[in-house]
Image: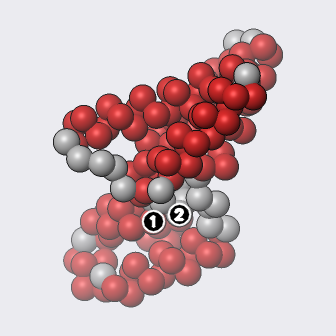
Amino acid sequence: MLRQKIQSDQIAALKEKNSEKLSLLRYILSQIKYKEIDKKAQLTDEEVVSVLGKIAKELNESIEAAKKGKRDDLVDQNQKQLEIVSPYLPKELSDEELKKEIDKVIEKNKDLSLKNPKALIGIAVKELKSKAEPSRIVKFLQSLQNK
């Protein structure tokens, strides 16, 4: 479903002669295709979101590196690419919503959280990675464990 939307947007960008958007969408589709070849099956929407999340993370890292290098041209270029990728990604949870979701995960895995609190981090990241940045989830869980 999401893959088809990206493909139709690629065709629209081609018709609009929007070369910047077109090249990024082609890159995204190629990354999806590589994953499908590795998996030997079509990706689910969740797996496509994972690929998009990886691309967004790379763009954010590029923006940070360009800022440190005082390369405003690259900052602008990567910012525009991030704006193209962002609409395909699900909205991240707010801190309050994230806390509720993590509480649900803790409640489901109460026995495990008492025996091995670090294992809970892996479970929470696996369940919530499509809803929030994994680093946010880990920080939140660590702050709960330190209390």
User: Which residue is at a point 25% across and 78% down the rendered structure image?
Assistant: 112
What amino acid type should be assigned to the residue bearing mark 1? Leu
Q: Which mark is residue 118?
A: none
When the figure is inspected, residue 90 is found, relative to residue 56, above or below; the finding is below
Q: Is residue 100 left or right of residue 81?
A: left
Is residue 47 or residue 106 the one in the foreground?
Answer: 47
What amino acid type should be assigned to the residue bearing mark 2? Lys
User: Which residue is at a point 57% across and 75% down the rendered structure image?
Assistant: 99
Q: Is residue 97 left or right of residue 27?
A: right
* Residue, disc 2: 131
Tell me the CA gap for discs 2 and 1.
5 Å
User: Which residue is at a point 78% across and 14% down the rendered structure image?
Assistant: 73
Q: Tag 1: Cα neighbours inside 10 Å, few (<14), some, or many (≥20)?
A: some
Indicate the position of residue 76 as horizontal and vertical percent values.
Answer: 78, 23
Q: Tag 2: Cα neighbours inside 10 Å, few (<14), some, or many (≥20)?
A: some
* Residue, disc 1: 128
User: Which residue is at a point 36% across and 56% down the rendered structure image?
Assistant: 44
Label 2: which secondary element: loop
Residue 100 can be seen, yes or no: yes
**Do residues under tags 2 and 1 come within 8 Å of each other at their CB atoms?**
yes
Q: Residue 145 sits in which quadrant? A: bottom left
When the figure is inspected, residue 116 is found, relative to residue 35, above or below; the finding is below
Indicate the position of residue 48 as horizontal and vertical percent values.
Answer: 43, 48
Is residue 62 or residue 31 the one in the foreground?
Answer: 31
Q: Residue 132 sits in which quadrant? A: bottom right
Q: Outermost residue toward the left?
A: 40
Indicate the position of residue 42 as horizontal and vertical percent values.
Answer: 30, 48
